[in-house]
Every structure is written in C-alpha cells, then in structure tokens.
Image (cartoon, helix red, strand yellow):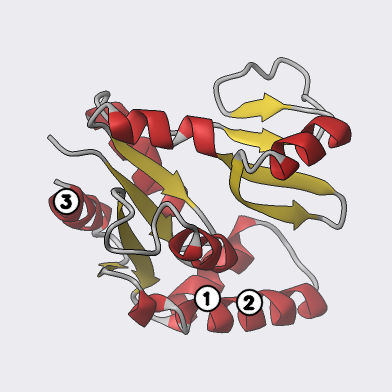
Amino acid sequence: MKGKLVLIIGPSGVGKSVILKALKERHPELHFPRSATTRKRRQGEGDDLYHFVSDDEFDALEQEKKILEYAVVHGKERYGTLVDEIIPYIDEGKIVIREVDVQGFDSIRKHRYFRESDSGYDLQSIFILPESKKQLIAHITDRAPISEEELARRIASMENELDHADDCDVKVINKEGALENAIAQVEEAIF
C-alpha cells in the first residue's frame, strides 16, 4: 500500500474529534502524528499527543525546515506539524491522518512535499460539513455558555472555514444523529 497524508478539516463543533477518535479505535494501522507545541505540559499529560518544546527549540525546528506548518494559538503558544511525524510514515507505506484548520491545510498543500504532482507524496483532504449552519451554531452554544461577541467571532470563523470546503478532495456531511454514516464515508474516502 502506498502511504499518504490525509487532512481532516472542518469548522469547530462539526464532529472532527469524534470522527478521529473512531478512526483511531477502528484502524490501529493508521498513524496519527503528534504536534510540536510550546505550551506547558498539563498535570498528568503524557507524550501521546504532543511533543513539548521550548520557544527556542520550536524556532530551531522551523529554521531547519522540520515543521510543515504551524499556528499561534491564544496569541502565544505555537502548535506545529512535524515533518518527522509525517514523511517517514508515508515512506513506510502508512496512511497518516492529521486534523488541521484551513490555514494549516493551505500551508501543507503548498508545501514542497505536497504541492507538485512529482513531489512523491500523496495528499488527500476531507472536509467535514455540518448538516446546516444552524446545527453547527447549536453545537457551539450547547458546549458551554459563551458571550454574544465570542459567538459572533466563531460564526465569522465558521463562515470562512466553510468557504474552503470546495478546495478539498472529499466533502462529508455529518448529519445530526447519523455519526456512523459520516465515519463510514470518511473510511471509504481514506481506503
């Protein structure tokens, strides 16, 4: 089997993390890369999700071109996709699954490893869509109370993210009460 990178994209609250959790449980042959982050390790947190680094170490990784893409979260902490968590696994013939935001998607698809047809690395993008914008707003507001200002910011972000759906190879609608169907569609697209 030829390896590839599969990016899972979609707005907050659409169910990406639930779909990813199901994929991890059902498909141990898939590789889910860790992110490099400059944030502090939380109490009881292991190394299964993150590669914790200092700001200087993150800078060095970036200068050495060992990061495919990164984002600054909450104005200070950086989270990055490590080349060493992706490329060696693809070279081994593994399918690598990575959740990214639309900025990460744009960065990765323009990266030299994936932008050209002769780069040698296959990239697939799957956008998870809500059944409706109303459904997504309900998911966001049901999670925890948020201010009107925060809701307006998230709706604007959602609109921006949804505008990128057509840039993706596959679109999957996560309909209310039909999560298994959405998971099955993602599995079918990957395999």
Mark found first going from the N terminus, 2 or 3: 2
Residue shown at 71%/15% (left/top)? 44
Q: Is residue 38 visible?
A: no
Which residue is identified by label 2?
157
* In this view, the mark in front (1 or 3): 1
Which residue is identified by label 1?
161
On the image, the x and y values in percent for residue 50 come to 63, 29
Residue shown at 80%/72% (left/top)? 147
Check whether the beta carbons of the residues at disc 1 and disc 2 lie within 8 A of each other. Answer: yes
Q: Is residue 32 left or right of residue 148?
A: left
Q: Of the residues shown, which amino acid type is indicated by label 3? A: Ala
On the image, the x and y values in percent for residue 92 come to 27, 26
Q: Of the residues shown, which amino acid type is indicated by label 1? A: Glu
Q: How far apart are marks 1 and 2 (CA)?
A: 6 Å
Q: In this view, does 173 lie to the left or right of 76?
A: left
Q: Is residue 2 above or below residue 72?
A: above
Q: Residue 184 carries which label?
A: 3
For label 2, the SS is helix
User: How many numbered markers are drawn?
Assistant: 3
On the image, the x and y values in percent for residue 164 come to 45, 79
Q: Distance between the residues labelled 1 and 3?
A: 23 Å
> Which of the two residues, 86 or 121, is positioned nearer the viewer here?
121
On the image, the x and y values in percent for residue 139 come to 52, 65
> Which of the two residues, 53 or 122, is positioned nearer the viewer here?
122
